[in-house]
Image: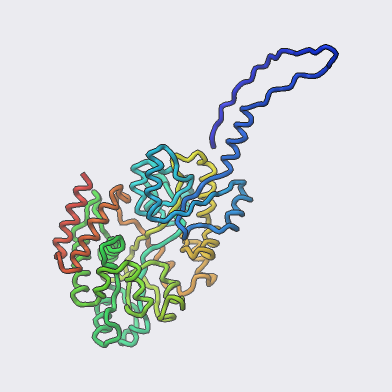
Amino acid sequence: MKRFTKMLLPLAMTALLVAGCGQKAEQPASEPAETTQTQEAQEKEISFMIPDWGVPNEELLAEFEKETGIKVNVNTVGWDDIRNKISTAAVGGEAAADVVEVDWSWAGEFHAADWLEPITLSEEEIADMPSIAPFVIDGKVLAVPYANDYRIAYYNKDMFEKAGITSEPKTWDEVIAAAKALKEKGIVKYPITMPMNADESATTSMVWMALSRNGVVFNEDGTLNKDSMLDALTFVDQMVKDELIDPANQSGSGMDAYRKITAGEAAFMVGPTSFVSRVNDEKESTVVGQVVPILLPGRTATSDKTYALPEAIGISKLSKNKEAAEKFVKWYTSAQMQVKLNGTNNTIPTRNTVLQQLIDDGTIKNSGAMLEQAKLIISPFTTGIPAYYSEMSNAMYNNINSMVTGNATPEEAFNAMDAKIKELLK
């Protein structure tokens, strides 16, 4: 909260005597008191910049105002525009908002630019939110995740059974064997789906592929681990050559690729946790009751790692209402609010205790391995999310796409990616 400097008013005043009248002299208005009241009133309002999917409804905002006396003015901004608005405002020495959206991939950049105010959380709270890892830098919590999105595998149990496969795949070799059987028997033309277009979803897909197969993506110095990444590239390249993945994924969006599982056009994928619900939503899915969420496959058993792509909120370093902003951040990301936001906004909780509660009481259905997978979340970035993440991702997804379209070998794709990352590290 701001501290205010109080001005001293002169104590000595001259008495005015008016003949035949005992009127008292009027006291001048106290401007410092008015100023203080105005400033205190301002502290009772904060601004909140968030994409539409994270906006709490009016009832929830009213609850917060009643509880704290703080009014929240929501500024709904498209996700793609938020980072630019924060950057532009900071250049002018202003806060775009007191509380702002912080995507996991922005954490390194925002830290390097010193745009976020650290937030105090207990060790117990941090331990309950594995997906907070990207936002903890140099021991400081720079943002708190409110919506989880970690990678989990899905398989169409009915399709597998039609191919004579009665158990879920636990290794990538088992996935490939099942996919080939499904294709050969004409059950599904392209059994596996994953994003391969030249966009962010191809980068994150190759990261989880390397992580699930080999347990590592980057070296301690921030460079790519050659053995792991080259293995992942080669593995994906072979799936493409074996026609196990729809070539349309090379130009379609990541969501287009994921929706093939709900359209019955694929039997296996690794994708967002939102598909736990989507696969059984009759408005979105033609395979209701057929798809089961399972643990990510690994090389010799199920993988003991996955990673998350969460959305968080943080406090602008340039905010003039930091104390009120922190109260809001802690309220918005609290266990109680995560339950409510799951009901109103369909957000997946970032607190594992809340996730377990919603699974146990039947709020989240068809959960499969969802809770078990959530406990395996780590950050694959050994030195934290780099400030140059967007440039690195650009190099990765363009070279991945070049490989799957037949314009580069896995080795050539890796070498180009590796060279760019080493250049960015200098």
User: In the rendered image of this protein, does residue 153 appear above or below residue 53?
Assistant: below
- Extreme residue toward the right, this view: 20
Q: Quadrant of the N terminus?
A: top right
Quadrant hosting residue 375: bottom left
- Extreme residue toward the front, this view: 19
Q: Quadrant of the C terminus?
A: top left
Q: How are the residues colored?
A: rainbow
Q: Which residue is found at the position 30% from the left and 47% from the top?
A: 387
- What percent of the width, then of the height, locates residue 201? 31, 63
* Residue 210 visible from this viewpoint: no
- What percent of the width, then of the height, locates residue 142? 42, 46
| Residue 42 left/right relative to 195 | right
Q: Which residue is found at the position 61% from the left and 54% from the top?
A: 63
* Residue 332 visible from this viewpoint: yes
- What percent of the width, then of the height, locates residue 69? 62, 46
- Of 417 and 79, nearer the camera is 79
- What percent of the width, then of the height, locates residue 150? 38, 63
